[in-house]
Image (cartoon, rainbow, N blue to C red):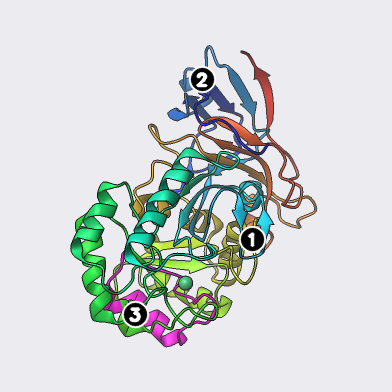
Amino acid sequence: MAEIATGGKSGKVVIQNIGLLLSGDIDKPILDADTIVVNDGLIVAVGKYKDVDVEGARTVIDCHQTTVAPGLIDSHVHPVFGDWTPRQSQLGWIESSMNGGVTTMISAGEVHLPGRPKDIVGLKALAITAQRAFDNFRPAGVKVLAGAPVIEKGMVESDFKELAEAGVGLLGEVGLGTVKAGYEAKEMVAWARKYGIQSTIHTGGPSVPGSGYIDKDVVLEADADVIGHINGGHTSLPEAHVCELCEKSSRAIEIVHNGNEKTAIAAARAAIELKCPHRVILGTDGPAGSGVQPLGILRMVSFISAFANIPAEQVFCFATGNTARIRNLKSGLIEVGRDADFVFMDRAQHSPAAGLLESVQLGDIPGVGMVMIDGIVRCGRSRNTPPATEVATVVSNAH
Ligand SMILES: [Zn+2]
């Protein structure tokens, strides 16, 4: 399914017989519940089957004792337009990522657009156009929050005001444009914040020729909301500097797939040791030189759980509720009133583990059995993950 109309309403959906319900909430990652009730795309009840109102459901989903988690959020992507990326000339990368459990993506800049404008009126026009285009078009139902301008020298406060008033809520990675000095970045980040625009800074060495180097002192001085790819994209700062950023800044610690894997683990461990696991969020930083990673977020969850030795249920929060809270999203947590965006998973077939969490902690990626966005089933058994041992099924679909 390539495109699903976003206007369709799910009606009442009952998701029952859940074996393990992951909340996305780092303070309470596992819920004592086996049923979720959804109405028109929103969660209306979470609890034990006998305690919730399951009457009159249009759709009933039997999870066969498998795991349900909030849909995964990729905190760092570089979309362009539609479900296409010129970086590796690939079509369908967003739909493919949905098959990896991703239901929301956040742009860190539409940087791969061929001929991307770098003059101020042009970069503003691109950001507004990208925001509008992805607001109007959701590939495979995936919510792509785009329109993230790459700031350039010469921008003034009124530019940020104008962008915010036009609906732009994000800055592209600070440092990808001509603004690379700490003092300049700091001023523009503060203007963005004043008008409600969230900022991310590039951390580490240049990603591809033409991109720049941003060291720890610039990251600290700029004080962007998100320390973008703290583990480099790809080239990382020295491990000691990465740990210093975790310690001295209170901003979000973003770890990405297309970064340095050794410092990814160091950053995750630093967050645990500093008792701030709620600051950790995950992204792929794709599409990029490393290609696109449809399973990138799932791979990060398994990799960090296994190598940083963090319980899998907590690491799932890095890819869901933490990001939702830091980025003010309505999805990402299993809570009444939130968006009904879920990933249904089970341990992959022939994983030596007894259950899903253990399989992740062993370093295996789980099998996705179904993905739901806004209460609507977007895919069944994933075409991309290893096969889930058991999959959720739609047992009734009345119209
Ligand atoms: Zn970057």
Q: Is residue 195 left or right of residue 148?
A: left
Between marks 3 and 1 in the image, the one whose residue lies nearer the viewer: 3
Decide if ligand 1 comes within 8 Å of the CB at mark 2: no
- Residue at 69% across, 22% down: 395
- Secondary structure, mark 1, is loop
Cβ atoms under marks 3 and 2 closer than 8 Å: no
Is residue 305 placed above or below 40 in the rendered structure? below
- Say what secondary structure mark 3 lies in: loop
Q: Residue at x 29, y 69 (%)?
A: 250
> Within 10 Å of the Cα at label 3, are there few (<14), some (14-19), or many (20+) other Cα atoms?
many
Q: Secondary structure at mark 2?
A: loop
Q: Amino acid at mark 3?
A: Lys
Q: Which mark is residue 58?
A: none
- Pair 2/1: label in front: 1
Determine crowd level at label 1: few under 14, some 14-19, many 20+ residues with C-alpha closer than 10 A. Answer: many
Above or below for 85 versus 20: below
Q: CA distance from mark 3 to mark 2?
A: 49 Å
Query: In the image, which disc is placed on residue 180?
Result: 3
Residue drawn at x 75%, y 52% is: 386
Task: Please report the bounds of the magenta region as a residue range.
Answer: 220-247
Residue 131 included in the magenta stretch of the image: no
Is there CB contact under 8 Å for labels 2 and 1? no
- The residue singled out by tag 1 in the image is 293
Closest to the observer, 100 or 135: 135
Give whichever of 189, 317 is nearer the camera: 189
Mark positioned earlier in the residue sequence (3 or 2):
2
Q: Which comes sooner in the sequence, label 2 or label 1?
A: 2
